[in-house]
Every structure is written in structure tokens, then in C-alpha cells.
Amino acid sequence: MTKPFGAMTVAQLSILIQSGAVDPVEVVRSIFESIEGHPDKAVFTVLLKERAIDEAKASSLRIRRGRSLGALDGIPIAWKDLFDIEGLATTAGSKVLASTAPAASDAATVMALKRAGMIAVGRTNMSEFAFSGLGINPHYGTPHNSHGLDVPRIPGGSSSGAAVAVGAGLVPVAMGTDTGGSVRIPAALNGLVGYKGTRGRYSMDGVFPLAKSLDSLGPLCRTVRDAVWIDAAMRGLTSSEVCARPLKGIEIAIPTNVVFDGIEPGVAAAFDAAVERLARTGAIISHMTIPAFDQTLTSMTRYGALVTAEAFALHRERLAGPEAAGMDRRVVMRTRLGEKTGMPDYIAILEIRERLIAECKRLIGDRLLAFPSVAHVAPPIAPLEMDDDLFFATNAKTLRNTALGNFLDWCGVSIPCGAGDAGMPVGFLLSAPANGDDVLLGAALSAEAVIRGDFV
């Protein structure tokens, strides 16, 4: 039986479209049938059916005339509810923004991928204002992790709907944002590839912010190759400059501190098995303590978190007014913590960050970093909704590993590496210092099959 179009990789679907075996209009109509027939109605907040059909018709005409825009022409994509879409209010997973003025134009990244021929099919659900790694949303509902066959489990956040849309086979790719792990966490928990580019690699124009010192973008998809193609188009390139790197001799460092604290045995076993497979290919594996990890956590305890300080500055008027009553109480509670970070503390955080970034570059050199994307598999939703203390503790643990990379200004890609408790997916996070994206993606292209092992 042929896979649904939304369950294909971008590359698989591209071959069908570019060869004329399927028409983009047929693909888009099938995608909407799948979305509309899917039982989980919390995945999308808005569907762009009329726009998508129009874009598909234009793509179809180009391809029939031999004027395709490239490999991504006719490929459907879903957008996290942070990206401006012309004519719509950008709600950022919140009801309080529903009455704001419609966007006058698409976000810069939306326009870039439209120029590559990609078709916007809708906006996906998310944690309110992108301020949670769990993906729970009391306003638009919480998308269920498609791998959770025993009980409803979290999708991960904040790009929750993006991950479920791809994981459930509704679309081949969705775009997310990542301030503390919001691409890599849901990718890991849903068995997907999630790539977070270096902060500043892509334009943030038209993207609702959380913390501008940390915000970055990236796709959630099925393969590293798909991520490489999307990355090129986001930067306005007609083809990617990324080349696969030989695994033999590639140096990968595994931290010995922080990232394995409290790890579930199943996650540790899946990660260790992937490391062993890499070592057998000739990759050079080393272990090291990274002092910046502990110093980052110490800084957060002393001065507060950078993300919380900047989120409070963004939302302080909203939190002081009647809109706060219409927000997720947990988002309100967490954001208000940022008020405790005064200007001297904020400056201290930035100075510490600059120093730790430089120290890490000297320590790591040309090596890549590898550790579990998340120290646990996706937990059940219900207990987290009922217990705020459990919610905050789980959220902190979920964000811990990935948020270190945001603070240290790394790029990273999460790749499925096996299964943990209840058969839930585990993510293997490869990271590199800022602007090491091409090297990182080149290594990930070669390492992906090895990291995955027999897990699909």
C-alpha cells in the first residue's frame, strides 16, 4: 500500500511531484483529507485550504511547463502559530492575541519557502507564547503524541502541533522555533529529526518572539536530508552547500556532567547503543566534563534564567493587565519570575554567557557534542495537567539538555536512536558551536542511519 503523501519524506514526495507521477493539487487535497479525518483536532489551529489550493495550482502549472522552482516545488509545509501569515492574526498559541490586527505580509521565512515553491497548509498548535517544553495548551487543546498507544502522552513543546502533524503522517515537514529546545524536544519525543539552526542563521522578521537573545528556527521532518533541503531554501539558496562527511575519524565528545542526571534507563540504553554503533564505524568517541554546563545552571540559580527575564520584559504590560486572566496560569507564573531579574543581574547573565561561549569553543575545538536530547520519554498528559508542581519539575527536566545549547549559542540536530519505556522514541542530539551548521549537518547526513539502528 502506498504511503499517504503526508507520511512521506520530503525527498520521496519531491520525486513523485517533479517526475509528474502526482500533481501538487492532488497532493494538497489528499493532505487536507488526512488532516480533516484525523481524530486529534488539537494539532492545527488554522487551516489555509484556499491559499494552499491556489499555491498548488500555481506549482502544478510551473512543473507542467518545465519551469519548476526546484526540488521543494509543490511540497506542503505546516507553520507553527508564531509565524505571520498574511491576512491572519498571529496568536502564538494564545487566546489573548486572537483579536490583534492581521499580519500585513508573511513572515520572511514563510516567504522564502514560498519562493521555493512550498505550499503553506496551516498553522500548528503550540505551548502558549512558546513558553513550555511540554506542549500542553489549555486554550486550543494539547496534541497527543502519536506514539503514545497506552495513554495520551505529551507531544513536547513548544512546537507541539508541528511535531504531531509530521509524526502522525499529516504533513512531510513542519516549521518550528527553538528558544530552549522547542524544535529538538518535540522531535525527540515523536521520533523525528529536528534541526535548530544557529541563532541568526535565518531571518526572524514576522516571527513572534519569546527571548530574542535565544530564539532560533528549524524544521521538524523525517530525515536529515529533508532538513538540509529546507535549510538551504530558508537561506534563499537553490541547492544546499552541505556535503556528507565520512564518519571514520570524526570526533564526537560526550559530556560526563549534567546531561545524564536523572536519565531513564531506557533512554540511556538507546543512546549508549547508538554511540557503540558510531564507534564501530570509526568515529572517535571521547568523554569530557564541560564546566560551562554547571556554571550555566549556577548562573540561573543566582540571577534567574535569561529566557525568563526576556519573556517578562516582552509580556510585562500584558501580565499587569486584564489579559493575564486569559493566559495559561503556568505561563503566567513562570513569566512573572523574570521580574526578579534586575538590570544588574541581566547584564551579569549576558557577561557570563559570553565568557562561557568562548570557553566552550576553546574546549570543544572541532569536535561535535553528543548526548540525549531529553533524559526521559514523553510522559502521560493527565498527571501534568492536574499537578502544577509536577508540571514545573517535568518541564525543567525536559528543557535541561537542549536549553544548554541555546544558552551556549550552539546549533543542534536531534535524530531518533531507539525506544525507551512504553516503546516511546528517544532522541540523539548532535550539537556544534555557533555557525558550525554545515559541518554538523554534513556529519548528521552520514551518521543518521547508524544512529537510528533498526528503529524506524
Image: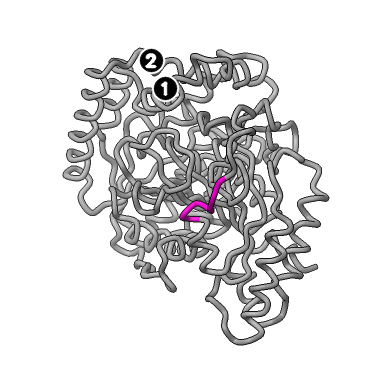
Determine the residue positioned at 31% across, 42% down: 409
Residue 30 position within the rendered picture, expressed as x and y whole percent measured from the top left: 78, 63
Front-lying residue, 296 or 283: 296
Determine the residue positioned at 30% across, 31% down: 293
Q: Main secondary structure of the magenta part?
A: loop
The answer to whether 14 is drawn above or below residue 335 in the figure is below
Asked if residue 221 lies left or right of residue 139, the reply is left
Q: Which residue is mark 1?
A: 312
**Region of the chain picked out in magenta, as a range:** 103-109
The answer to whether 202 is drawn above or below residue 145 in the figure is below
Q: Residue furthest bottom?
A: 66
Q: Residues within 10 Å of mark 1 (few under 14, many from 20)?
A: many
Q: Is residue 74 magenta?
A: no
The answer to whether 302 is drawn above or below residue 395 in the figure is above
Q: In this orientation, does residue 449 appear?
A: no
Residue 309 position within the rendered picture, expressed as x and y whole percent measured from the top left: 36, 23
Determine the residue positioned at 52% across, 46% down: 176
